[in-house]
Image (cartoon, helix red, strand yellow):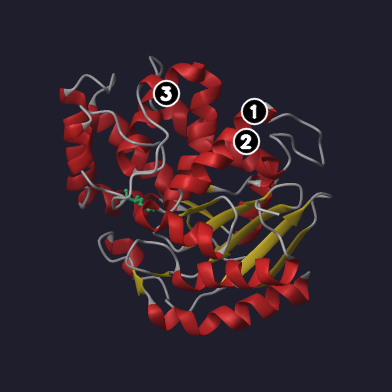
Amino acid sequence: MEEILAEALAVAAPQRAAGRVADYIPALARVDPDKLGIAFAGADGTVHGAGDCDEPFSIQSISKVFMLALALEKVGVKLWDKVGREPSGDPFNSIVQLEHERGKPRNPLINAGAVVVTDALIGDGPAEAAIDALLALLRGQAGSGNIAVDEEVAASESQTGARNRSLGWFMRSFGNLSNPVEEVLGIYFRQCAVAMSCRQLARAGLFLAFDGRDPVTGRAVCPWHRARRINSVMMLCGHYDNSGEFAFRVGLPGKSGVGGGILAIAPGHGAIAAWSPALNAAGTSAAGAAALEALVERTGWSVFV
Ligand code: GLU
């Protein structure tokens, strides 16, 4: 496996030059665009890695997958009254669809939808408990207590977060946000600023490859039907207006983040995390997607077999 991972990185490496590091969040603009790493967590919990697989990076929107699992656990299917599950075909921070659809975001993986999910997870409790729940899930599943919020990245995004705040206020005007906008956005910025390595991320996402159950401990992180639904939302919505292209090239559910990470789920096989900070125009890691494409070509993994 380590050989396959190293090969995938070698194929993908030239793609680093095809993308650009996210610069609308100043703290992310400082990350070295040459970084490239990948890790695979399999059924026995062993995590194989190659390249910069031990270096923590900002998981950004990959956090939305774990927040979705937590919010569904908390409020159940009622969540779908507030957020849809259709691909948006629009950029990650688009506001245009929200007006047509009266403040109900298309899906939980675009920014507006993720803000609704965060609001639901906060519920009527203290906002900070939502971050505690996220960190407990990530630390527990990855088996590493050192996973934390990078407060510098969170502050940097908050300082430049006018667009995400606008989405929040807009949804609030339609009555689709229960908590104060500033409180919900504060948590959203912090969940996006969680720093993890490829190894930690692949291990943390492993339950999604095994019907919601951690294959090592046997613990059900979520019921099988919920894991399948989260995977289907990732498949159709995980890369914004680039989701079709990713499904076409990789054929696995995945979620990208503007920190350059991608979490991909190979049901029955394991979870893969790739990282390379330079992004394509839709905000998906250019070399990360290429590495995953090379990996599935070699392994034959696909949800379409
Ligand atoms: N924190 C980022 C934002 O809200 C997340 C976007 C992404 O990772 O795709 O702009």
Amino acid marked by disc 1: His
Residue type at tag 3: Trp
Residue 255 falls left or right of residue 2: left
- The answer to whether mark 2 and mark 3 are in CB contact below 8 A is no
Q: Position of residue 53 (x, y in %)?
A: 62, 67
Discs 3, 1 touching: Cβ within 8 Å: no
- The residue wearing badge 2 is 228
Does 198 appear above or below 150? below
The quarter of the image holding the C terminus is: bottom right
Residue located 52% across and 68% down the image: 288
Pinpoint residue 63: horizontal percent, then vertical percent.
Answer: 48, 44
Mark count = 3
Looking at the rendered structure, which numbered label has been put on residue 225? 1
Cα separation between marks 3 and 1: 15 Å
Location of residue 8 by image quarter = bottom right
Rendering coords of residue 26 (x, y %): 27, 63
- Residue 249 visible in the displayed image: yes
Rate crowding at label 2 as few (under 14), some (14 to 19) or many (20 or more) other CA atoms within 10 Å: some
What residue did someone put label 3 on? 80
| Residue positioned 81% across, 36% down in the render | 217
Q: Residues within 10 Å of mark 1 (few under 14, many from 20)?
A: few
Q: Amino acid at mark 2?
A: Arg
Question: Would you place residue 142 above or below residue 71 in this image?
Answer: below
Please report the residue visible at 62 percent of the width from the left and 67 percent of the height from the top.
38
